[in-house]
Amino acid sequence: MTQLIAQRPEPGTPRPYRFPAVVRRSVAGGSVVAADVPGHNLAVATLLLDAGGGRETIGVEGVAEVLAKALEEGTTARSAADYAVALESLGTDLSLSVDWDSFSATVQVPVASLPAAVELLAEAVRRPKLDPADVARVRDDEAESLRLYWANPGPRADAVLRADLFGAEVRHGRPLSGDPHSVAGLSVDEVLAFHRSWFAAPGTLLVVGDLSRLDLDALGRAAFAGATEAAAVAGEPFPVAARSTRRIVLVDRPGSVQSTLRLGHQAPHRSHPDYVPMTLGAIVLGGAFTSRLNHLLREVRGYTYGIRAEYGLARRFGRFVVSAGVQTAVTAPALVDAVGEIARTQADGVTEPELAVARDWRAGQLSVGLQTPRAYASALSTLVVHDLPDDYHAQLRESLLSATVPSVSAATAAHLNPDGITLVIEGDAEKIRGELEATDLGEVVVAAI
Amino acid sequence: MSETGFPWPIETTRLANGMRVVVSEDRSAPVVAVNLWYDVGSRHEPEGQTGFAHLFEHLMFEGSVNVPKTEHMRLVQGNGGSLNATTNPDRTNYFETLPAEHLELALWLEADRMGGLVPALVQETLDNQRDVVKNERRQRYENVPYGDAWLRLLPLLYPDGHPYHHPTIGSMADLNAAELATFQAFHRSYYVPDNAVLTVAGDAAPAEVFALAEKYFGRLDSGGARPSAPEGSLAGWAGPVSSVVASEVPAPRVYLAHRTYPYGTPEYDAVTVLATVLGQGRGSRLYRLLADGARLAQPDTVSAYGVDLAYAPAPLIASATARPGVTAARLGSALAEVVDELVTGGVTEEELARAKALLETDWWTGVATVDGRADLLSRYATLFGDPTLVGSRLPGWRAVTASALADVAREVLRPEDRVTLVYEPMEAVA
């Protein structure tokens, strides 16, 4: 007969958490930042340039993404097809990514192939062919790709929220990758100009793997060859503008079986001193599975498959966003519940049992999340982009574990703004508009998008 | 480079109640992955109960005899861990990765829901998770363009009564009809030690894990006879099938699918390499011929992949979305030509080497984490009865030759066995 053990076991002896020593080299005008992670067959290299969406000017949003795609259309040394076969025969693609603060190109290959892969990475980034006909074609493909993507629920709601929070007259008030129209309107010259302006600085090469088998200086020389410009200055953070009225913006999606919620307001930038208590507060509200929002809307009400709250933080700005898909018929009550939990958290702060989960979860995830060369490369990237000290990850664990109920409650009080939040709902307007108006959560307007 | 795909130790034992335990020690990170495979998936579901294996997976997080509702998630995350579970046609898996000092907690939690779920399972929980799963279905399959492609392909690939005929997410009607007693019986049949494999990988010694497994799971009773999945013959099920769907999609899209071989066979290794030649990366056939060359397909939409199912010929699926001005018919015939060319023209040594290099990196990426390794060990123990076979997959891919690819392509890519699924935007059809 089955007899379960009722007593929950105590934890064993904690193993030490360690982040490998950060190795830095200055080579050929650029910086190599590396971490030694022996025992892996694969190594990773990422070239990081200060050429993210934040460097785009108004009217050319999406140009960095188009340029990224155009880099793979052949180099001064070989055709697009030859380039693809050369790189993929090493076992990697060229993983290109644009965020608000950086452009990155990453290769991941068996350690012995890393020098050849970095040579090919540099060939595409520093010496692309950028034939005007190819660039125009890539631009058209990217515009169509965005049109297909925007047929999904979410991108339109997010664009509406972003414009409402920051205003469409600033770059970060528009979508990171632009929209189908802005990209279709880009000229070939604008793409070439972005490459000239932002790809001429050496940038930073991140290297993670078995460093005893890698020559960091040689990798750096390959990555920085041909770079001519000095690094640009990042710019100061924008001030946070807090609103005092709430509004509901409806994005019509006729026939939608769910309503897509994007609720948000402005927040501080990534390196704000409140980063740790602020983000722990967001875990209590909507980050952990047992968070207030997920518990109420999923586990008690059954309104959604999942709901989460998080801060999206860049070098110069940030925002707080709650995201969920809820069944159409319960859109209004789900919204009332969500705003209620945000307001409760802002007003009353967090409790010790909830904070204990948030604190230990994030601290433990530093170990759990840092197992692969790629994960370490991502951690190094955070150091570089936000200009953080080399012992940042080790210190972060201590900061997380020492966060207290008063410090986190003070941060939720200061940085959550339930009275000034914008509630964007993408759903079947005909079915949900009346109920939304009846909630009294705020004026309902229909977005022209 | 390692000869085997799994250069870590593997130790196994079997408890008296039939539960198999696999341990792979690796001290390089202070974390431990705990992974359980239960040999039950949607292939076991009888008619009228589609979606039950997956809905049951949700119930496993809702409390057991010594673990109140929400505690499972709270205890794992609140001790620094990640956790989840998945259900597919073949099996259901549950997994968590934690800082190593919490290994015993994870085993206690898993044993409690294996041995003590039924007394804690109540109607309110079932009703709540039924709503959650229905929202999952809306979010993943119904509210996104092309989201129901997999739901549409399965019944075209496998006949009525075949275990792969219906999708794991199930139908809304069956989910609505689900009764508590069915789930209680489901747990008693399938959630028993002799139908499970427990794997622990990472910062733990085999002897310690075996002792803890005995402590927490050794006291659970083994199960009785349980219903096996239907055999699902494909005999007489052939002939090209095609289906055209008019839907709220932004552009025409075409899927071509073929039944191939079961996952784990040398022939399926060849299918995996073939799919990589066909549809992975900018050097693939589909990218070069349809996206780049003929400019018929949107570049970032072309793909080909095998779905790794083990109990019947697994599908190989190729798909592409039309560029503006390109009709579904034009795209569909071009896609078919590229697939046919694999049969008639074979594959070059350069294409083969490219595909193998990409698969090599994919493999090492998959085993770079203790959680990735634990899941693979559970998989090989469950599907093939021997976790050490995990090391043979990568050598299997490496051993594929161009002539093996030609043989497999000839055998499985026959136009007369092809399933074609076409999405047309509503207005194009009206």
Image (tube, rainbow, N blue to C red):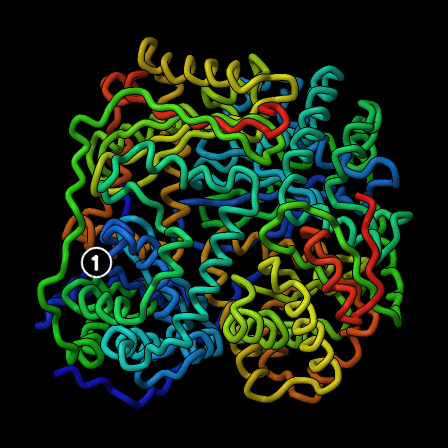
Q: Residue furthest top?
A: B344
Which quarter of the figure is the C terminus of chain A placed in? top right
Residue A286 appears at what percent x and percent y?
61, 71
Which quarter of the figure is the N terminus of chain A placed in? bottom left
Q: Quadrant of residue A433?
A: bottom right
Q: State whether residue B354 appears in this view.
A: no
B250 displayed left or right of B290:
right
Chain ID, mark 1? B
Observer-nearest of A408 and B312: B312
Q: Residue at x 77, y 57 (%)?
A: A315
A339 displayed left or right of A237:
left
Residue A446 appears at what percent x and percent y?
81, 52
Q: Residue at x 41, y 74 (%)?
A: B125
* Residue underneath mark 1: B10
Residue B291 appears at what percent x and percent y?
56, 20
Tell me if residue B74 comes above or below residue A114 in the rendering.
below
Q: Secondary structure at mark 1?
A: loop
Q: State whether residue A379 appears in this view.
A: yes
Observer-nearest of A383 and B92: B92
Q: Quadrant of residue B121?
A: bottom left
Residue B314 appears at what percent x and percent y?
28, 36
Q: Residue at x 24, y 69 (%)?
A: B187
Q: Residue furthest right?
A: A169
Tell me if residue B170 comes above or below residue B294 in the rendering.
below
Pointer 1 local density, CA inside 10 Å: few below 14, some 14–19, many at least 20? some
Q: Amino acid at mark 1?
A: Ile
Observer-nearest of A248 and A176: A248
